[in-house]
Amino acid sequence: MLHKILELLGFCLGGFLLSITCNEVLLRFSKSLGIRNNNDVVIRWSNESKPSLGGVSFFVVFLFSSIIYSIIYFEKNIFHDFQYVGLILAGSIAFLMGLADDAYNTKPFAKLGIQILCGIVFIWTDTTLDLFHNDFLDGIITIIWVIGIMNSLNMLDNMDGITGTTVFFILVTCLISSWIIFDFNTHIWSITLISMIGAVLGFLKYNIHPSKLFMGDAGSQFIGLFVAFFSIKYLWNVGPQSSHSSWLGLIITLIAFTPAAADTFTVVINRLKKGKSPMVGGKDHTTHHLVYAGYNDKNVWFIFTGIGLVSCILAISMVDLLKHNIILPIILSISFFLIVFAFLYRNTIKYKEPPRK
């Protein structure tokens, strides 16, 4: 047991240090690279342009963790695992698409096409939601989930530290959920998850207010794809894996994703009410409205950190309850999401963006 713990800590520390090194190098040698919408105060929250290449470290850590794992466990060929091949392939596609978007501002429909392709790769490599127990319907829902999470985290990436912190808590939830379901282990999935947790912590060193670096679309698209994969594996499908209803997994997933889901639902509702496209950028997110209510950027980060922490604890507790066949608290826990959503949504109605001078 001690050996496994030290091994996991080693990968987490390695991911953290590699992320810091990668981000430090990018920060020094790309003062102007990866900067989009320079000083565009209509779209961007920050008036100061900063490099948007922080997400590169996520992909670098992901690849290096795979390589190091293959070296340590040379007798285990990770490329014989069809799901892992799918994660590498879809992750690479998402990262390259995000990188292209950072550089060239690709068309929305082109991005959507790539996100659909990522979902199809998941289906092809046997990573699908088990909700309706129907291959076609579950495949459609899987694609919608992948698209939804990639866009949701991209939309949430609008203020220092928010998306990175939200992703950190979701990944911790997925990791501990996997240990609850399949017992504590150091197989490739645990190694990949804990390495990425280290990478996100390394990124947050540069992204928490006042930030020096943004993750950019390369980061939000890759980490969105990554989170979508592991949420399917260890949150959505926790019901069937525990011989319970698939819909219990939906509730657990919704709780784990509370910060991102509440923000996305609020923005979509408000924009549709105004006849605007939900996919167009703007300063109308729940984070922005908290600032309009009188909080500063750092306080908003603390609020979302608190929501993320409670979401993580609740979701992990729900997985453990499910393992012990205790169902009712899981169903009732949906009230947490509704309370958070109601608070954030009401805030967007009560406090509006001040007129530009």
Image: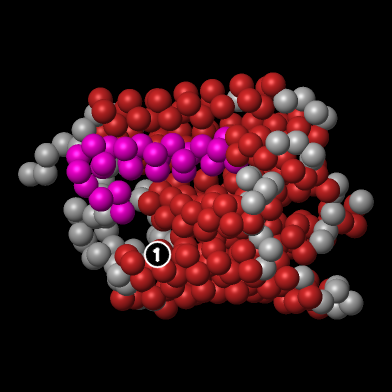
Q: Is residue 275 magenta?
A: yes
Q: How many residues crowd around disc 1 within 10 Å: few (fewer than 14), some, or many (20 or more)?
A: some
Q: Nearer the viewer, residue 281 or 69?
A: 281
Q: Is residue 243 left or right of residue 231?
A: right
In the image, residue 22 above or below residue 119:
below
Q: Is residue 343 left or right of residue 248?
A: left
Residue 208 placed where, x, y %? 45, 50
Question: Would residue 328 be seen by someone viewing this image from the given angle?
Answer: yes
Residue for point 77% across, 45% down:
241
Q: How is the image coloured?
A: secondary structure
Residue picked out by circle 1: 112
Q: Quadrant of residue 351?
A: top left
Query: In which quadrant of the rendered image does the C terminus lie?
Result: top left
Q: Secondary structure at mark 1?
A: helix
Residue for point 27% across, 37% down:
270
Residue 239 placed where, x, y %? 72, 40
Secondary structure mostly seen in magenta is helix
Point out the stretch of residues depicted in magenta. Answer: 253-279
Question: Would residue 28 be seen by someone viewing this image from the given angle?
Answer: no
**Identity of the amino acid at label 1?**
Leu
Residue 70 placed where, x, y %? 79, 76
Residue 266 placed where, x, y %? 35, 37
Q: Is residue 134 magenta?
A: no
Residue for point 47% across, 43% down:
260
